[in-house]
Amino acid sequence: MATDTAPRPLFPEEETRGRDIYRTALGRLFRRRSAMVGLAILTTLVLTAIFAPLIAPYNPEQVLIGVEDVKRRQAPCIHLLGCPKDQPQHILGIDGNVRDEFSRIIYGSRYSLMIGFTTVGFAIVIGSVLGAIAGFVGGWIDNAIMRVMDVLLAFPALLLAIAIVAVLGPGLVNALIAIGVVSIPAYARVMRASVLATKENDYVMAARSLGASSIRVLIRSVLPNAITPLIVQGTLGIATAILDAAALSFLGLGAQPPTPEWGSMLGTERNQVFTAPHLVFFPGLAIMLTVLGFNLLGDGLRDALDPRLAEKGVVPK
Amino acid sequence: MFRYIIRRLIYAIPVLVGILVVVFVLARLIPGDPCTAILGEKATPEACARLNQQLGLDKPITTQFVIYLERFIQGDFGNSIRFSRPVSLILVERLPTTIELTMFALIIAVAVGIPAGVISAVRHNSTVDVVTMIGANIGVSMPVFWLGLMLAYLFAIVLKDTPFWLPPSGRLSAGISAVPFFEVWGLNVQPDSTGFKFLEFIANLYVLNSILTQNWALLWDTIKHLILPAVALSTIPMSIIARMTRSSLLETLGQDYIRTARGKGVPERLVVMRHGLKNALLPVITIIGLQLGALLGGAVLTETIFGLSGVGRILYEAITARDYPIIQAFTFIIAAGYVLINLLVDISYTFLDPRVRLQ
């Protein structure tokens, strides 16, 4: 995968060098234990999301009243841990609407991944277009775009997201838009910095003097250099996006019940934390592990792609 | 230096005006109108028209903005639509709760984060380092609302009847009330005057108020109520500060002047603290400044969980009730505070590193 994103070379010998850089980076990534833990968590998460119907013993929205002899907010019942065999097994217990908590958590992984990738995808596309325009064109356009970004950054992200959801109305899609908008400035800044750093290079001058159009120069010469920081920022950004989306759902502004989304599951049961702590503990644990996975992988990618850090011994082995 | 500060303040004006515009427009874009929010769904059009006229909401939006701006510059934030009280009074009541909470959280984050980072860097690749960094990684991934609820469950239910019990909600225990220090001191202030608002603001910082009145029982009660929300709120900044301190100090300890210091026989303790840490703090300070925004966002969640009526909570409620004056004033205060803190961070660079010339 790494070789696909390698910069397109102007000279053949650059190609091998480009490949080498990504190969050593990948090697460095695989040698980092924490990054591998992150990758393992995320692989499990992706597999869970794909095979959710096979893993989950129940339909996540199925109310079990009349189907089984279970009570609201019943504590977990695991046969292996001594729960009587004549009782139906619910390893994470029953939620406030008499549904199987485990099945809901399993299906929640789909929402979590979807939230992470769509918001960051949206923010990367808009942010890098804005950043590229700002860096490439310069002048008052640059100033205007970046001042708007400054204003966006002057608000605490979660508060701004709450305000945007209030404008658009509560709901999962609107929460995703809000979080996407709030994350735009980060990518715009990364992209602008990359453009500014690359713009003055000789090979860009060369491409220009050969008559390449601005857009062509941007896509062929500037963009490949910006991809590395964007990947790193994006991976870490997914972690933040999932946390913020969960927080919005927790406040009742994001995914609405009965959607099995972790933040919303936690939010609807938060007043029961003293009587049914399992209904708060497990969704939160799921959010934490997912975010941890993206954070570990993101850190690993950053360190692997920035050999300067590894050489100085800043990065633990 | 002085000229730099003045110039930075002038540069901040367009950003602040931008914030004002954004807040004003955003507040107006929130669907639904304040009339039904105040008078209820069954309000007649005539009653609504009268109310809108009363509130000045029937004028064109540009006129509304000009009036708003004029009053704003005079420090008049208008009246809350929902509570029919001056927003400035509500600010005086609510802002101290959040300031106390975020400051307490920030103190915990710095007091734990920096030493943890230093130990990690000094003994790097040791077990201590690995454990600290695992902790920091888990910390940055922590959903604040989940940690808050789990802490409340642990300390209020599981540890009930032990000395470690901590209250899960509120600012003070039932039956305890905070008497403002100016009343204890017998100061005679005119209610509703600016001076009164200022004194009231100070008095609502319960920790400060209880110290000023030397009421130690009240101080202890306040702190007991602050511990859980502040710890929950501090986790993410604490982890980020620890990681930043570690990597920055490691980089500094690899410099030539550190080798020189060691070579001339400076005790290791001084090498790390004076030569290393002092130079490594620059990026750490930047990160601390940036974390304040995250703290204010997290305050909405922590205040919700721990039943604190602070800025975050009231802002959330105001947005759902379309209480424009409150939304505008509180968002502006938060954003302006954020801009100001970043300025302070930039200025602090010159004290930490004389090589940084501000121009």
Image: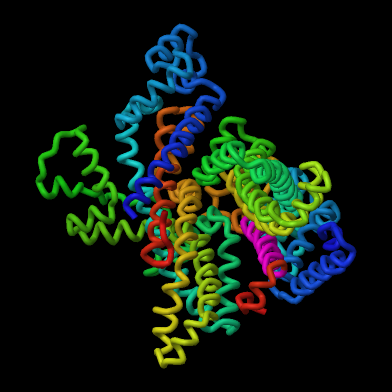
Instruction: Name the residue: 24% across, 49% down.
Output: B178
Quadrant assignment, res B273: bottom left
Q: Is residue B107 magenta?
A: no
Location of the C terminus of chain A (image quadrant): bottom right
The structure residue drawn at horizontal position 64% and vertical position 72%, both measured from the top left corner, is A309
When asked about the image quadrant of residue B65, the answer is: top left
* A71 over B27 or under it: above or below: below
Q: Answer above or below: position of B89 versus B344.
A: above
Along the viewing direction, whichever of A28 and B292 lies nearer the viewer: A28
Q: Please provide percent x and percent y for residue B113.
A: 47, 69
The residue located at (36%, 57%) in the rendering is: B225
**Vertical arrangement, residue B332 with respect to residue B85, above or below:** below
The magenta segment is: A284-304
A49 sits to left or right of B90: right
**Quadrant (top left/top right/bottom left/bottom right) for the N terminus of chain A:** bottom right
Q: Is residue A95 visible in this depiction of the protein?
A: no
> Residue at (44%, 34%) from the top-left corner?
B17
Residue B76 in percent (x, y) is at 31, 29
Q: Main secondary structure of the magenta part?
A: helix
